[in-house]
Image (spheres, helix red, strand yellow):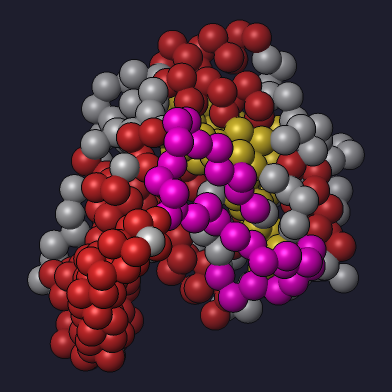
Amino acid sequence: MLSPFDTGSLGAHKFVIAVCTARRPEMLRRCLESLVRLSLPVGAHLQIVVIENSHEPTAANIVAEVRRQADIAIHYRTESRPCIPVARNAALDLSNALGADWIGLIDDDEFADPDWLVKLHGACIAFAADVANGPVDQICEGTPPEWWEPRSYQDRPTGKQLRGAPTNNILMRASLVRKDGLALRFDERLVSGSEDVEFFRHAVAKGARIVWVADAWLHEVLPASRLTPKKLLGRAYMVATSQTRVSQIRRGRFAGVLVLLPKILRRLIVGSIALAACAVVWLVRPAAGKFLFYSGAFRIVKAAGNILGSFGYSGDYYKSIEGR
């Protein structure tokens, strides 16, 4: 059975994989080199789109080098407006212009297993899905803090239907974003994140089906600079500001904040208790005390992000580029 959003037949196999990047040429090279080595579904034709979110084409030479060595068309554009959802919309526009039937999304700091695309596409066909989402293995450069925990997927089985997804490991039917389909766009008001969550929330609300693919792995390289306490706290703050902004867009400026008040108060109370208790615990069990300290600090920072986000503050997490 085909998805109601599939406007073609199973014989339509024009795949475009889109990568948004910003001044990380070596990471982009590793990403592109993994993509040109991908195994393809039977009858598939693959093209790659690179959107550099920068005034200057810092990755142009890298793209040209990989293009010369590959038997796959790689299209490169710059998007000067410094905003992730703007860059992602530019990637969708170019993918549509190339006549894509399927659009894959991958981050520039990731690289793919050779069978990644085949597994995502196979799951879409097997489960009559419009979107397939897979796991991301986080590879740390350097030693992360002992209290840091990598992503956990809790043994989700392939085929499990999801209510949303991020953009870091995606294959979707292009009909979701075509003007003659659902015409979905990334919300360019969400400059500090959550635009991907909202994109796929709207997709599900319009009837799209998202499934999990447990063995369609991507690998993300985390520079040591992204694993410092300051950077991790900064990311938590940024995520909280974006959550508030999403709530305001959905419900209005004041109602959007009011609905978050219980969560804000809970974070402030529990975080304060954790910070007060950590000093005593630290004396007896330093590792446990440190974990308790950061547990409390993250809650306080998230509460601050929720509050300040209601006034338009989003922090500067994305203003610095981590990685090469």
Q: Position of residue 117 (x, y in %)?
A: 74, 42
Residue 162 is inside the magenta segment:
yes
Q: Position of residue 310 (x, y in %)?
A: 16, 74
In the figure, residue 209 lies in which quadrant?
bottom right
Report the span colored magenta.
135-164
Establish if 204 lies above or below 77.
below
Tell me the quarter of the image containing the N terminus: bottom right
Q: Residue at x 79, y 63 (%)?
A: 158
Tag count in the figure? 0
Q: Which is nearer the eye, 177 or 217?
A: 217
Q: Residue at x 34, y 18 (%)?
A: 58
Q: Which is nearer the eye, 283 or 1?
A: 283
Q: Residue at x 50, y 40 (%)?
A: 107
Residue 242 is inside the magenta segment:
no
Farthest residue toward the left? 311
Q: Which is nearer the eye, 35 or 208?
A: 35
Establish if 229 lies above or below 219.
below
Helix, strand or loop for the magenta stretch, by majority: loop
Side of 260 where 212 appears, left or right: right
Farthest residue toward the front? 284
